Amino acid sequence: MTGFFITFEGGDGSGKSTQARLLAVGLEAAGHTVRLTREPGGTPLAGAMRALLLHSTASLEALAHVDLVPGDELTEPMLPLTEALLLSAARAQHVARIREWMDTGVIVISDRFADATLAYQGYGRGYDLDTLRTLERIATGGLRPGLTLLLDVPVEEGQRRKRAGHEEGEELNRLDIETQAFHQRVRDGYLALAREEPTRWITFDATDAPGALAEQIWRVVSARLGG
Ligand code: TMP
C-alpha cells in the first residue's frame, strides 16, 4: 500500500464533513489524487448498513423488508452489541475498498473511521473498550490512519449547529438525538484517544470560523505529506 490515509473525527455538529470536503478540494488543486469517503458507509452495502444504523422509525419502515408478527411495532431498540457488530460489518466492506484505493497510491480521506466506534459506542454508550478494539482489528485487518484530525467543539455548540441544520431541513439521526451527557462522554472520549496517540492525532478548536480552520488543517496536512 502506497497511499496515505487521513481521517476526520469529532462530535456531531463539529463541521468535519465540510472540512473533509475542503481538504479534498485543496489537495486535488495541489495535484494529488484524492478519494473522499465516510463511515458508516463508503460502499453500497456499507451504505445500506448505515441506513439501518442511523434510522428513524419512519425510515426503518421504508426499508425493503421487515419481519413483523402481530403486535410488533417498528420500535425495536438496537442492542449495543448489534450496533457495534453492524458498524464493524460496514467497516469491513469499506476497508476492502480503501485498500484498493491505497494500492493505487491515492490520498484517502474518510469522514469518521474506527475511532468513532471507540468514542461513541465505547465512551458514549459504555460498551467495553477492549471488545471494541478486538472488533476493530477484525474489521480493519490492521488498517489504521496515518493522520487523524479531531475537530473539537463544546457539546452545546455542536447541538446548536445540529438544531440549526435541522431547521433548514437536515434529518436528525438516531445518535443525534442522544442526551447531552452522552455527547459529553463522546467528546471526552475523543480527547482521551487523541492524548493516547499524539503523533497520529491532531486536535483543532472547531469553534474557529470554517475558513480559518481549513487553513490550520491545510498547514498540518501539507507538512505531514511533505515530511
Ligand atoms: P455522521 O454524522 O458523521 O454522518 O455520522 C453518523 C453518526 O454515526 C454520528 O452520530 C456518529 C455515529 N457513529 C457511531 O456511533 N459509531 C461509528 O463507528 C461511526 C463511524 C459513526
Image: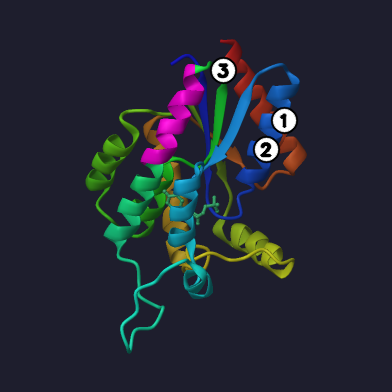
- State the CA–CA distance, disc 1 to disc 2: 6 Å
**Residue 147: percent from the left, percent from the top?**
50, 27
**Residue 201: percent from the left, percent from the top?**
48, 31
Secondary element at tag 2: helix
**Residue 7: percent from the left, percent from the top?**
51, 34
Question: Which mark identifies residue 25?
Answer: 1
Count of marks, rendered view: 3
Question: Which mark identifies residue 21?
Answer: 2
Q: Nearer the viewer, mark 2 or mark 3?
A: 2
Q: Nearer the viewer, mark 1 or mark 3?
A: 1
Residue at position x 69%, y 62% from top?
A: 165
Residue 18 seen from this side: yes
Residue 97 highlighted magenta (yes or no): yes
Amino acid type, residue under disc 3 in the picture: Arg
Left or right: 195 as drawn, with respect to 138: right
Looking at the image, which is closer to me, 148 or 114?
A: 114
Other-residue count near label 1 (Cα within 10 Å), few / some / many at <14 / 14–19 / ≥20: some
Amino acid type, residue under disc 2 in the picture: Arg
Q: Are marks 1 and 2 in contact (CB under 8 Å)?
A: yes
Mark 3 = which residue? 224
Can you say whether 88 is above or below 182 in the image?
above
Amino acid type, residue under disc 1 in the picture: Val
